[in-house]
Image: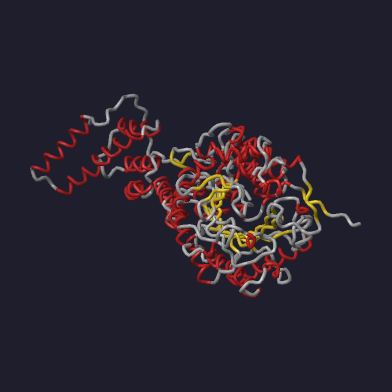
């Protein structure tokens, strides 16, 4: 299932990125971070040559040097050196270079001034800003620290240091810097906003909410703070309030594309798909190359059953996100939304609803070096925002799982680890939570002891199975309670078979779904009590139609920060798992399928299929062992498969079966 993207979600995280004031550089959903001048500068139209010295300063320097040679008083000479500062025209020139984004020249001049006047803070401040602008975050730290040291009562210096520390992942130190800026200047709205961003990333959502509200109290027409508040309220599960915050941001700044997209995400989660579509389209009208909004619109169009429109918008998103130009007919171009790396096709469960035991291909596990190669390419080209470590098999059985998760985190690629929970003992849970950047999708498809038999004859009891899942949730909540920053989240996925042709019966009504939601609401509430956590606002399990008549691919409810429960509409794995109460009927109208456009599945042996339901690799279009993902998905074989969806070639047999319509057999 394609993920929706919240603009400015932290990686973990939005793993939307949070809007932040950034040093003269526009980020999506943000205004520039500001590195304010520490004192007023008079305008000067004189052009200053970087390597020239003004006579006035040159004379001072010569006088001091001669005095040193003649054995002048060291204390007085040091005082003179400390008091030296650039003349106004030099400072103006440096400022103009920075504001005009002439970063190479600004860096040279800032270095020159910092060497001549090492105790003057302005050149250090600009030098740190230049390093920020040019992506040299590590190098920006020393100038930012120097600026604070030389000007400890300058709130902007502490603010700028906070920005650098946050980008370096030193969140507690960033928090301290922002708080120091606020202590000096209590009405510093931007510092309150950035403090909120840091607290949000630390998982302290209640404090983040308070910081954003303080920023808004100081500066009511602050659209970025309203947007950030909306992101936080959304993570807190308060969707109606989040909607109001996004709308306020848009009212202040009508061309705020990121707020429009975030509003769309919230409306989609509220099940208001038509309104979500309108919000995404408005975001794209404002910012035509906005890949995240285009991807989110694609999700909504899929939910509305408009698959060809969904593919068309995702083709645009793919080009904007990756920069990869289509080869040949644009109508046959990739529209990738989901990429799957099958670590192994071996599984220790034998679920009735899954074709794992019916595989005809060899069983095996992907080589570690191939996995790293795939992560490298996805990171470099942004083929998909999230890597799904699944297609067939149980990925936690791979012997190098933890190293794989570490590598994905190192490459800054979000990873979705879908697991049947069987191996999640205490030691394994801790390792996964320590290393995974992304989501643990706990496949809790059979959520009751009565339905657990559907998983087949397995070597783990129901009590052990449910204990593993509770352990995962509890260990995660302990980290939240301790204030530790988290870079992952948990989604508990439950299958809903109501009004489907599935060969199993699990959740068949909203009432049954309500019982499952109550169970997890109660469990998390008790854990909150035991851990001394602030109670979290959760969905009422008695609410009407929790699964929306099971007409949506999924419906998600928040249990706690970073923990969700998703009711997932059952599917029949390309009609290989259809109830014997149904017959399959051929229909010409259903020949189109979006999967060959939007899916890329790399099987454990390197074969590439363009459908996540192709459990036996029948739709192979290439192999990545001696090629690249980009080359394979643009290949003639890939385009021919997509062309078959448009009626230009006969459908492959697996697609013909999948496209048949299950029709319930009528009683004689």
The x, y position of residue 454, in whole percent, is 70, 67
Which quadrant is the C terminus positioned in? bottom right
Instruction: Mark yes or no: residue 495 visible.
Output: yes
Residue 45 lies, with reference to residue 70, above or below; the image says: above
Image quadrant in which you'd find residue 281? top right
The x, y position of residue 351, in whole percent, is 67, 64
The x, y position of residue 199, in whole percent, is 51, 55
Q: Residue at x 65, y 67 (%)?
A: 525
Q: Nearer the viewer, residue 621 or 549?
A: 621
Residue at the outermost left position: 70
Left or right: where 371 falls relative to 300: left
Residue 314 lies, with reference to residue 200, above or below; the image says: above
Q: Nearer the viewer, residue 38 or 509?
A: 509
The x, y position of residue 288, in whole percent, is 58, 33
Residue 51 lies, with reference to residue 462, above or below; the image says: above
Image color mode = secondary structure
């Amino acid at each position: 299932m394609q993920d929706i993207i919240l603009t400015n979600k932290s990686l973990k995280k939005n793993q939307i990125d949070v809007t932040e004031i950034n040093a003269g550089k526009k980020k999506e959903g943000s205004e520039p971070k500001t590195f304010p001048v520490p004192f007023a500068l008079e305008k000067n139209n004189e052009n200053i040559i970087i390597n020239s010295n003004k006579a006035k300063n040159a004379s001072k320097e010569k006088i001091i040097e001669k005095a040193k040679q003649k054995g002048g008083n060291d204390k007085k000479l040091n005082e003179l050196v400390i008091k030296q500062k650039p003349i106004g025209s030099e400072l103006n020139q440096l400022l103009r270079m920075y504001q005009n984004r002439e970063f190479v020249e600004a860096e040279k001049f800032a270095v020159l001034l910092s060497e001549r006047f090492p105790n003057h803070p302005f050149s250090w401040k600009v030098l740190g800003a230049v390093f920020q602008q040019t992506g040299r975050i590590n190098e920006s730290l020393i100038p930012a620290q120097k600026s604070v040291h030389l000007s400890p009562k300058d709130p902007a210096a502490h603010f700028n240091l906070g920005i650098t520390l946050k980008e370096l992942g030193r969140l507690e130190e960033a928090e301290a810097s922002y708080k120091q800026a606020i202590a000096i200047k209590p009405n510093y709205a931007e510092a309150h906003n950035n403090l909120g961003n840091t607290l949000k990333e630390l998982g302290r959502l209640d404090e983040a909410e308070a910081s954003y509200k303080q920023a808004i109290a100081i500066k009511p027409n602050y659209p970025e703070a309203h947007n950030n508040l909306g992101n936080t309220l959304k993570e807190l599960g308060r969707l109606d309030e989040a909607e109001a915050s996004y709308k306020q941001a848009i009212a202040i700044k009508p061309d705020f594309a990121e707020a429009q997209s975030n509003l769309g995400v919230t409306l989609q989660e509220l099940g208001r798909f038509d309104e979500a579509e309108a919000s995404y389209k408005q975001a794209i009208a404002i910012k035509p190359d906005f890949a995240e909004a285009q991807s989110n619109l694609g999700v909504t169009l899929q939910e509305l059953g408009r698959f060809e429109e969904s593919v068309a918008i995702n083709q645009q998103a793919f080009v904007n996100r990756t920069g990869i130009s289509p080869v040949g007919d644009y109508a046959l171009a990739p529209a990738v939304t989901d990429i799957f790396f099958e670590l192994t096709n071996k599984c220790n469960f034998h679920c009735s609803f899954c074709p794992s035991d019916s595989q005809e291909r060899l069983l095996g596990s992907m080589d570690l070096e191939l996995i790293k190669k795939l992560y490298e390419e996805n990171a470099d080209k942004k083929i998909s925002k999230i890597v799904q470590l699944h297609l067939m098999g149980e990925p936690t059985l791979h012997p190098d799982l933890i190293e794989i998760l570490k590598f994905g985190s190192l490459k800054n690629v979000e990873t979705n680890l879908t697991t049947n929970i069987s191996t999640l003992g205490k030691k394994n849970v801790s390792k996964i939570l320590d290393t995974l950047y992304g989501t643990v999708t706990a496949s809790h498809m059979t959520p009751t002891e009565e339905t657990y038999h559907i998983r087949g004859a397995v070597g783990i009891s129901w009590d052990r199975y449910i204990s593993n899942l509770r352990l995962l949730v509890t260990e995660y909540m302990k980290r939240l309670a301790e204030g530790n920053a988290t870079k992952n989240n948990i989604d508990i996925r439950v299958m809903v078979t109501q009004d489907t042709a599935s060969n199993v019966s699990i959740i068949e009504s909203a009432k049954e779904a309500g019982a499952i939601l109550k169970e997890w609401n109660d469990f998390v509430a008790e854990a909150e009590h035991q851990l001394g956590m602030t109670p979290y606002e959760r969905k009422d399990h008695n609410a009407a139609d929790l699964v929306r008549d099971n007409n949506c691919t999924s419906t998600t409810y928040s249990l706690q920060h970073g923990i969700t429960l998703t009711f997932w509409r059952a599917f029949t794995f390309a009609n290989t798992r259809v109830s014997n109460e149904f017959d399959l009927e051929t229909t010409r109208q259903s020949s189109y399928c979006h999967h060959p456009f939007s899916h890329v599945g790399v099987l454990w042996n390197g074969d590439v299929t363009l459908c996540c339901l192709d459990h036996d690799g029948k739709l192979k279009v290439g192999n990545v062992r001696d090629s690249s993902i980009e080359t394979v998905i643009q290949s003639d074989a890939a385009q021919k498969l997509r062309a078959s969806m448009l009626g230009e070639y006969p459908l492959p047999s697996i697609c013909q079966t999948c496209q048949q319509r299950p029709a319930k057999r009528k009683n004689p």
